[in-house]
């Protein structure tokens, strides 16, 4: 986080201060995810987190400082989830299928969309100085997919012809766009189908056992 | 548009009234596309369109009525563009390539995103009653792609194995997600790559001449 936002830097806080800051942040993230940035105000946040106005102002003196911290918080959660053991660094197609399944089953997906993408979409045109923070988060997310596909190439699981960056962009775009279409349709189907087709496309580059689907066409 | 919004229905207006309404709408759409819904206020709109507060209130008594009309206006433009002769109802792969090229070259793509999708993302969580209008617009858009792919199947250009609805969802999701990623990155590359990969995936179902790329792998 940039020091210019005036927000207290977490590492300089006491243990109690860190806990209060974390509680405010968790409630801010939840309110913003449910209602959006614009509909979330200080009073709701104070009430939800059980803090006073001066406490809130102490940790997050401006809306920008709060939004920046929520972006960092959501990015951390998303990236940690994707780096979890269950996805094995995305070095195989089953990991991508399991990842898609998770979000297709996630009941808030078609209600509130992606926790990071929906926030990004809502504020990307505003004057809030959050662009670098967002770009960095999405770069890391794309990097997880790209490195997984590169690893698949090293392991001989998919063809050297595949372009890992391009496929990573397809997967992340299908996810973000699918989330928007699902929210608009109030139906998970657009996300489910976009992810399935995107992963099917990665599978068209499969070299050995996984090539069964392609050959069957 | 629903009569409950209180907005004047265009067909009941005089010719002069229609022209004034259209002028307000055009400026509202431009302001919203550039700055977002929340940063667009009545004063900016009155100044841009050269109308008085009472004129603005006469045509669009509430922000909801204005936003609904802007959605309808942007949807009409997007759908008309996609139904244009240059894309031949998307009955061939070159049409999809030309469509992707258009948006990749469109300089406002990575600055302001999709005129309809960026608006949808910004307001999908708000209390504005615009859900049906958005769902209808995106349904029609997806339908254009789906019907193009169905037509390609009828013409024997792509395999009967292809799922037109799934591919249409992939194309539209890659477009919407690619637009968001391009805005975040301030770089058109994520949109370009996502669209290229999505169209490459449609091409994996090509039956005859177009199958060259696949066979070359």
Image (cartoon, coloured by chain):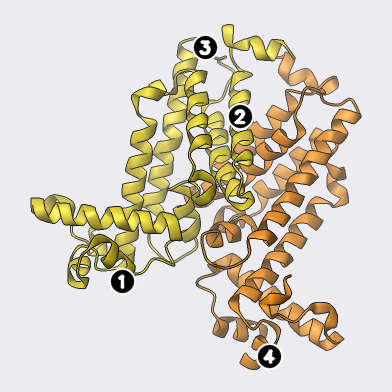
Chain colours: A orange, B yellow
Badge 4 crowding class, 10 Å Cα cut-off, few under 14, some 14 to 19, many 20 or more, is some
Asked if marks 3 and 1 fall on the same chain, the answer is yes
Residue B74 as seen in the image, left or right of residue B35: left
Which mark is drawn over residue B157?
Answer: 3
Q: Residue at x 72, y 56 (%)?
A: A137
Which mark is drawn over residue B43?
Answer: 1
**Residue A73 position within the rendered picture, expressed as x and y whole percent measured from the top left:** 73, 67
Mark nearest the camera among 2 and 4 is 2
Identify the image quadrant of the C terminus of chain A.
top right
Asked if marks 2 and 3 fall on the same chain, the answer is yes
Q: Mark 3 or mark 1, which has the lower sequence index?
A: 1
Mark nearest the camera among 2 and 3 is 2
Circle 4 residue: A55
Q: Mark 2 or mark 3, which has the lower sequence index?
A: 3
Q: Residue furthest right?
A: A155
Q: Residue furthest left?
A: B14
> Could you tell me how far apart the alpha carbons at marks 4 and 1 are, in whole angstroms?
35 Å
Q: Nearer the viewer, residue A194 or A142?
A: A142
Q: Mark 2 or mark 1, which has the lower sequence index?
A: 1
> Which chain contains the residue that carries disc 3?
B
Q: Residue at x 81, y 23 (%)?
A: A210
Of helix, strand and loop, which one carries label 1? helix
Q: Is residue A50 visible?
A: no
> Could you tell me how far apart the alpha carbons at marks 2 and 4 are, in whole angstroms?
50 Å
Circle 2 residue: B196
């Amino acid at each position: 986080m940039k020091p210019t936002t005036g927000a207290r830097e977490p590492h300089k806080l006491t243990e109690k201060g860190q806990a209060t800051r974390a509680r405010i942040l968790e409630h801010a993230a939840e309110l913003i995810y449910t209602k959006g940035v614009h509909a979330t105000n200080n009073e709701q946040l104070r009430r939800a987190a059980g803090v006073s106005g001066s406490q809130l102002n102490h940790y997050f003196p401006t809306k920008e400082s709060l939004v920046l911290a929520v972006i960092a918080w959501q990015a951390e959660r998303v990236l940690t989830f994707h780096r979890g053991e269950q996805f094995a660094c995305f070095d195989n197609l089953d990991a991508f299928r399991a990842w898609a399944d998770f979000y297709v089953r996630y009941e808030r997906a078609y209600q509130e969309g992606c926790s990071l993408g929906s926030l990004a979409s809502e504020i990307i045109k505003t004057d809030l100085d959050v662009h670098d923070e967002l770009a960095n988060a999405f770069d890391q997310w794309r990097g997880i997919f790209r490195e997984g596909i590169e690893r698949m190439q090293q392991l001989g699981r998919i063809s050297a012809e595949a372009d890992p960056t391009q496929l990573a962009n397809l997967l992340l775009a299908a996810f973000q766009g699918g989330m928007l279409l699902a929210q608009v349709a109030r139906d998970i189907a657009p996300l489910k189908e976009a992810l399935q087709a995107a992963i099917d496309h990665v599978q068209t580059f499969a070299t050995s056992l996984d090539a069964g689907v392609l050959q069957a066409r």
